[in-house]
Image: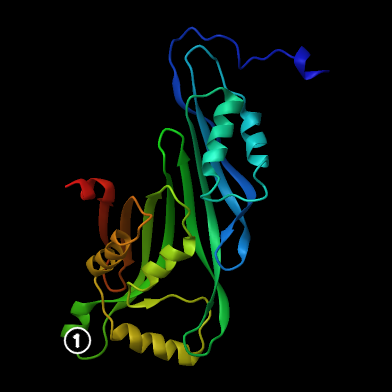
Amino acid sequence: MPRKSLKDIQSQPDDRNLPINKVGVKDITYPVVVMDRADGLQHTVARINMYVDLPEHFRGTHMSRFVEVLNRYQGGISTKNVRNILDDLKGELNAKTAHVTIEFPYFIVKAAPVSGEKSMMDYLCILQGDSSVDYYTLQVKVPLLSVCPCSKEISRYGAHNQRNVVCVTVRAKEILWIEEFIEIVEHCGSSEIYALLKREDEKYITERSYENPVFVEDIVRNVAIKLLAHPKVLWFQVETESMESIHNHSAYAQIEIDKQKKGQR
């Protein structure tokens, strides 16, 4: 039966006089291609949410059109074309606003510090776009090792150390590379984290991290200083959580700065 002969239930009028802020599709698992600074493009798998607004006089939206828009961007999704995706959603669904969230693992080949053994590290990234603003949001989560300065100072033998997860969220209008923020964060802890280490690498990391102890407060401040100097970042939030090895709690710190407002003062 031709589609035109089928009744369009979604477009029926609605008399409840209540507009909907966001309606759409959530948690689509979808293969995507993202920009890779080293290799040009990287294939990965994303979880995607896509929404538009719905005026009060329409009963429903057309869910299939969200996936149709997504299918147009199989060749590559990046900070460069988020705005195009939002514009397409608004056009296809006759909406005033559109929103998209793309969450995906990003992979980088890292060489161990002494042996040079190479392995793949994965970093969780979230790219968000909102048609009501002129910037996009990029979030990257980076694991680190931290050694406690207090523990080192007061202990005769060693110091407690643990894994940290640093979450960097930035707003920008220009193209940003995910690798930029991974590198910024990895230089702000006691040591980087690696997927593959030999004995000589473990020795090096253990000794190096012991000589470079940091609190969670040090980590967020060190990252914030570098983001303040980044010319393309308009706003940022830095969070870190330290999964404490000897305490029954995590340690946490956060800094948030709007560089545009800061520049006006």
**Left or right: where does residue 34 sit relative to residue 140?**
right
Q: Residue at x 27, y 51 (%)?
A: 259
**Left or right: where does residue 6 sit relative to residue 258?**
right
Q: Which residue is mark 1?
A: 155
Look at the image and name its color scheme: rainbow
Residue 105 coordinates in the image, percent (x, y): 54, 59
Q: Secondary structure at mark 1?
A: loop
Q: Residue at x 44, y 10 (%)?
A: 17
Q: Residue furthest top?
A: 15
**Left or right: where does residue 237 sit relative to residue 1?**
left
Q: Quadrant where the N terminus lies? A: top right
Q: Nearer the viewer, residue 113 or 29?
A: 113
Q: Amino acid at mark 1?
A: Ser
**Left or right: where does residue 118 sit relative to residue 174?**
right
Q: Residue furthest right?
A: 1
Question: On screen, 133 above or below 171?
Answer: above
Q: Quadrant of residue 43?
A: bottom right
Residue 56 coordinates in the image, percent (x, y): 47, 14
Within 10 Å of disc 1 (Cα), the crowding (few <14, some 14-19, many 20+) is few
Residue 213 coordinates in the image, percent (x, y): 26, 79
Could you tell me if residue 249 is visible in this image? no
Q: Residue at x 28, y 82 (%)?
A: 212
Q: Residue at x 25, y 76 (%)?
A: 148
Residue 129 coordinates in the image, percent (x, y): 47, 41
